[in-house]
Each structure stands twice: as C-alpha cells, then as structure tokens.
Amino acid sequence: MSTEIQRHILNFQSAIALDMTTMATKPIEKVAIVGVSLIKISTNTAWEISTKISKATGRIGGAFAQALLKTGRHTVTALTRQNSEAIVPDGAHIVRVDYEDDESLIKALEGQQFLVITLSVRAPDNLHGRIAAAASKAGVPYIMPNAFGNPISSDGANEHEVMGKIMAERVQDAQNGNSSSITMPCGFWYEWSLALGEQWFGFTIKDRKVAFFDDGKRVITVSTWDQCGQALASLLSLPESGATPSLAQFKNKQVLINSFRVSQRDMLDSLHRVLGTSDADWDITYEPAEKRIADGIAEMAQGKLTGFAKRLYGAGFLSTNKQSDFAASMDLANEILGLPQEDLDKATQRAVDMLESGWNPFPGETLV
C-alpha cells in the first residue's frame, strides 16, 4: 500500500473519529414540554398574564420554554390540548394532542430528545404516567418528570412530604423502557407562593396580613421561575455525553437547584423594603405549623383547593422537615450550571407586581 493511500486512510479514520466525538458531545436540541403557558416578566417588571389557562396546564412550563428559546440552541415543542387557549412563547412550536389517545401522544413525541412534564395538581391522576409511557414508546431518551418540589427518596418515605410518594411514582414513570429520568428539585416556587395568598406562604399582601407558622423563623429552600428556567437551559446546553459535566451524568438522578434559603420573617422584611412598610403596618399573627396541616386536611375533606396548599406548605415549614431546606445539607448543581446569585427583593417585587396586575392563576374560583 502506497504512502499516499495510507495517508488518505488515516485522514478518513480521523475524520470519522472527530465526527463521532462531535456527535457524542453535542447538546440536546429537540425539547418537548407538556404544560406551557406564557407568564413572563418584561424589562419594566410588568407581568404579561394569560388568564385563559387550561385547568390541566402547569405554570413553570412557560419559564422553561422561554429560557430554552433564549439560548438559540434548542427547538421547543409545546404539547397542548386540542381546545387549549394557553398562550405559548414566541418561537415555540405548538402541537395539539388528544391526551386521551395514546397514539396521538406517541406521534407528537416522535423525534424529541427531551421531554419536560409540567401539570396542574388537578390534572387526572393517570395522565403523568400515560405521557411518560408514550414518550418511552416514541423513543424519547430523557424525561424530566413533574416533580419540582423537594428531593425525593426512592420510596417517597418522608413522613413530612405530602407529595413524597406521588413524586417517587412520577420518577418511576420516567424510568420506563427507552427513557431515563432527570429530576430537578427546586423547593417551593418563590413568587408564585408569596403572591397566591395566605394559604401558601401565609401572606395576604394587599391586606398587609401574614400568618407566621410557629415563630416564622423556619428557613426553607425556594427557587424563582427564572432560576428554574435558567437551570434547565444550562442543563440541556451541556454536552449530552463524552465530557464532564454532561447531561448523561444526571441520568436517573436529581439535579438540585435553589435561589434562596428564606424564612417567613425574611420574606416580610423583604416586603418591607419593597413596599416601604414596617411591622406596624401589618397584621401579624402566629399559629402552629401542625395546626395549619390539620386545618388543611380538614379543608381537603371538604373539597377545597386551599386545603391542599395549607397541608403542603404547613409541612414544608415544620422544623423537623429536613427535606424542605435541602440547600443547607445537600449538594446543589448551581455552580455546575452557572446559575446566578439572585436578589431576594427583586423576586419579591415581581410577586408584588403580579398582584398589582390582577394576576389570578385560578380564574373563577374562590380561594377560601
């Protein structure tokens, strides 16, 4: 064999090796999201709110879609119901599906590389599992399940975690056949929980009222929607494999992130700075976290939406619930993902802006 031929063979082999390396380290491009609705903050902090949201549509999905599109590296497909009026971010592709038809789901998910599931607490119990099963049949390699609260044990065994067992089941849904899970615990969503009302973080901002659970100084881990969106965008911008860090390193694992470690007292102090108020301007009451949980259970028995919130958030503020302040003792992925250190008062301002805009994620319902 001549030297010239050997040189061409070596060049060809090198080109193949380089191409394989490039393919191995290429980030995920095609991302599908279930539960996308546009709730965004503009540069002047005014909120653009869509109140025409399907009862089975999540809220975090909009933040995920916007952050992914902002990178310019990903195509985002928003799966919506046939009759959904939800507004999706500019640049996202809309695919309308029949969630009662498995074949419709499978067809919509074919060719996707990563699926994010976000669903309302009122979505049908079996919907999450059916979507995950369809993704597996469609060959989607990665699924981020609807499990965005606190870290999850394999069996959901944490007496304080109201959603622990359900979250563990959702992770198992995602580890199905062709698919692997990547879960992103982030704690309670800060602006959402602060703005929603007394049954969540204990605040009724417009009336200047707050109910402190126990002494109001229990610290928990929370995240903003912006931080969650940035975390997903950074995660999916990593090489899929062949490098460190890579997306594959998180296969069937949890990616823990946060924005702040805060107490109710910290939140009130932040509201004072944003609103120009003091304790004297607020009606501050105290109640045991255990009572809040008991009241929530009683309200749930009456079919009240707020009962679930009271039980869930009351448990989150129990001093014995170590999971709810996971950032104090567990390794976070913030540094790996290059997440910013956020400003608490700016996040609090966004919650205030939401309320002043007339924001209501549950139109037509009385949250009492």
Image (cartoon, rainbow, N blue to C red):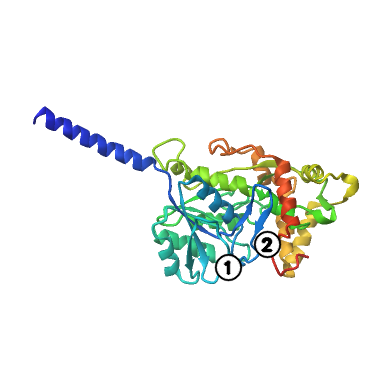
Q: What is the CA distance from the residue labelled 1 to the residue labelled 2?
A: 14 Å
Front-most of 96 and 46? 46
Residue shown at the point (65%, 57%) measured from the top left: 48
Is residue 147 among what the camera can see?
no
* CB atoms of marks 1 and 2 within 8 Å: no
Residue 190, image x and y in percent? 69, 49
Q: Quadrant of the C terminus?
A: bottom right
Q: Tell me if mark 1 has few (under 14), some (14-19) or many (20+) residues whose alpha carbon lies within 10 angstroms of its own.
A: some
- The residue furthest left is 1
- The residue furthest right is 280
In the visual, does 358 lie left or right of 341?
right
- Secondary structure state at the residue bearing disc 2: loop
Is residue 356 among what the camera can see?
yes
Relative to 51, residue 75 above or below: above
Q: Amino acid at mark 2?
A: Pro
- Secondary structure state at the residue bearing disc 1: loop
Label located before the other in sequence (1 or 2)? 1
Residue 164, image x and y in percent? 62, 54
Which residue does the numbered mark 1 point to in the structure image? 85
Q: Amino acid at mark 1?
A: Glu
Residue shown at the point (60%, 60%) measured from the top left: 58
Residue 346, image x and y in percent? 71, 43
Quarter of the image for residue 244 reads top left
Quarter of the image for residue 217 reads top right
**Mark closer to the observer (1, 2):** 1
Residue shown at the point (43%, 47%) measured from the top left: 28
Front-most of 128 and 97? 97
Residue 97, image x and y in percent? 48, 68
Q: Tell me if mark 2 has few (under 14), some (14-19) or many (20+) residues whose alpha carbon lies within 10 angstroms of its own.
A: some
- The residue furthest top is 3
Q: Quadrant of the N terminus?
A: top left
**What's the mark number on residue 361?**
2
